Amino acid sequence: MAHRHFFSLLLDTLLWSYTFLATHKIIYNKIIMSIRYPEFSWGQPLICLILGLITSALIYFFLPGLSIGRAIYFKTYARLNRPFFKRPYIYVAFLIFFITLISGLYVSQVSLREFFSHSGLMGAKRIFIALFTPNFGILEESLFAAIETIYMAFIATLFAIPIAFVLSFFAAKNLMMGSPLFKIIYTILRFILNLTRSIEPLIWAIIFSVWVGIGPFSGMLALCIHSIASLSKLYSEQIEAIDQGTMEAITSTGARPVQIVWFGVVPQIILPFVSFTIYRWDINVRMATIIGLVGGGGIGTLLMQYQGLAKWNEVGLLVLIIATIVWAMDTISTKIRQAIK
Amino acid sequence: MLAVKKLNKIYPNGTHALKNVSFDVKKGEFLIIIGLSGSGKSTLLRCINRLIDLTSGSIIFEGVEISKQEGAALRKTRSKIGMVFQNFNLIPRFSVLKNTLTGALTRTGTLASILGNFSKEDEKKARGFLKTVGLNGKERSRADNLSGGEQQRLGMARALMQDPILLLADEPVASLDPATSHTVMDYLKKINKELGVTIICNLHFLSLVREYGTKVLALKDGEIVYQGPPDGIDEKWFKTIYGEEAKEVGIN
Ligand SMILES: Nc1ncnc2c1ncn2[C@@H]1O[C@H](COP(=O)(O)OP(=O)(O)O)[C@@H](O)[C@H]1O
Ligand SMILES: [Mg+2]
């Protein structure tokens, strides 16, 4: 119970500190005072933190109805049966949302004036006309690059499958709680996989382009490593969701561990595995295009080059081809996944 | 053939599921275990073939202490003890024949079994046992296309493939309708009588107990409250086991 009070107070403190900080730095300094580069010191967030703590403490003791932390950690206190707009903390949430909205619009420099300015509209017109009159002169070159991209995605997926397949069994909680050693392997593997997955393929491509040089190989490696991490996760979640009964039955026949997995687990997961894998290939083709933008080879690299030269008609053709590939992959993968369900 | 002595099972969450359970099973017996849901019936069966580890006590099977066995020795013991389950626990997408053959995994090489290379004798045997449980002609159907009763009989065929001397049945008829229940119980009786397999069976219905059991063991909150012949379970015992409010319901 005590930890709930703590977390609810902590959440409120953070929310209020944020509110004070955003109000002061963006709404007051930048918008109202129009200071372009308001001075910053670490004392400011510290003061906001202290103010936030004071505010939430006051709310905690005197106006608990306003506390978002309470609403989240103490369901009963929030009187969830009250109508939505009669809950006081909802208005605090609105206030925070509103401040964030204003700050967000300001920070992303949303400006209708520029959006509808004459030169802006002319630029948009020029680029759209160029995009819609693609230059088919570079069709051959583009198709080759597109094929490179598709193959790159295919090989990346293919290499990732067996590795992810094996890893997924060691990353499945229900199979790994047997002995302390298994638990350690499970924990370490999960950690590595999560870390790998949290790094975007784009970053991996940059790392590998330094490692093995710019080109399709670095793109393939980037996709492969990210696919291994995410397929392992999807696969192992599937393994965790199996019906343990079959495994129990196979175990009771006196089967060996590998046989237990092969007969008690694999038949239940094979279809979802195929489905995930095809889905992953689909994702990889899309990503391969993006990765090309940072030098991962294929059609993305080509797009980057023409874009740099401001050759919009050529870019138009490339965009058309990419759209076609993505659409085709999407359709095919959906069809296959429906067929094997 | 089986002697359970002072068996205790405490789950990691602290549930004391079995308390000092002791009993003997003689060869050829059809022992029925009754008790309310949660009384520890499933736990008891799973301790006998060591699907779960016991906390303390001893289990002597065919003169061998099996409660601490591991690895190959444990697999050898398990292979002599067949088991059928309330939810059948088959491999749904596999054929009836292949499901039966999984009962022979223990004597098939790891690689051979992965490649699906079961021996000719085992295949012949599997067909024989499918006939025993009345599933001949269905060898090639998928297991999930069978009716509930048929799936349970397939579960029995799989267990028989192990050449078991003891068969554990965990509420084998609890997911079946009354008529099918009788058919399935009749097959169990046949396995007991004709193949000489000793049977320990968890049941819910008292009427089935009197009809099929040669001995009854009643559990309540993890303790044995009755041990003896089926006719010994009268109104008074029934109330002790199932509580004062209980009424005997028949199954016909
Ligand atoms: N895996 C488990 N972890 C913790 N407690 C369990 C587990 N399995 C069963 N129990 C508990 O042990 C007791 C006996 O359960 P069980 O053997 O399944 O009874 P029965 O088969 O007679 O219904 C119950 O109180 C149940 O909640
Ligand atoms: Mg049970």
Image (cartoon, coloured by chain):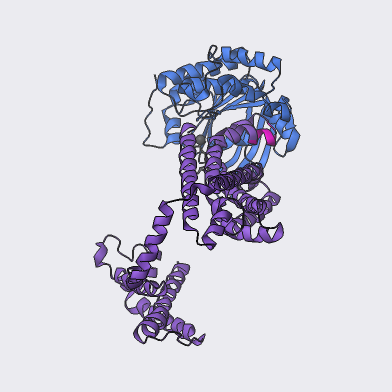
Chain colours: A purple, B blue
Q: Is residue B13 visible?
A: no
Q: Return the residue nearer the eye: B234 or A101.
A: A101
Q: How many marks?
A: 0
Residue B18 in the image, given as x and y percentages of width and height: 57, 41
Identify the image quadrant of residue A35. Answer: bottom left
Q: Return the residue nearer the eye: A281 or A264.
A: A281
Identify the image quadrant of residue B125. Answer: top right
Query: Which residue lies at the image location 74% right of the left edge and 31% below the top edge?
Result: B64
Q: Is residue A328 left or right of residue A120?
A: right
Q: Return the residue nearer the eye: A262 or A69.
A: A262
Residue B162 in the image, given as x and y percentages of width and height: 66, 23
Highlighted range, magenta: A255-261
Is A59 drawn above or below residue B151 in the view shown?
below
Q: Is residue B75 visible?
A: yes
Is A167 drawn above or below residue B91 in the view shown?
below
Query: Which residue lies at the image location 70% right of the left edge and 15% below the top edge?
Result: B120
Q: Is residue A4 left or right of residue A163?
A: left
Task: Verify whether residue A228 appears in magenta.
Answer: no
Residue A193 in the image, given as x and y percentages of width and height: 62, 54
Identify the image quadrant of residue B77. Answer: top right
Residue A192 in the image, given as x and y percentages of width and height: 64, 56
Q: Quadrant of the N terminus of chain A?
A: bottom left
SS majority, magenta: helix
Query: Which residue lies at the image location 70% right of the left edge and 27% below the top edge?
Result: B106
Is A306 drawn above or below residue B103 in the view shown?
below
Q: Residue furthest front?
A: A137
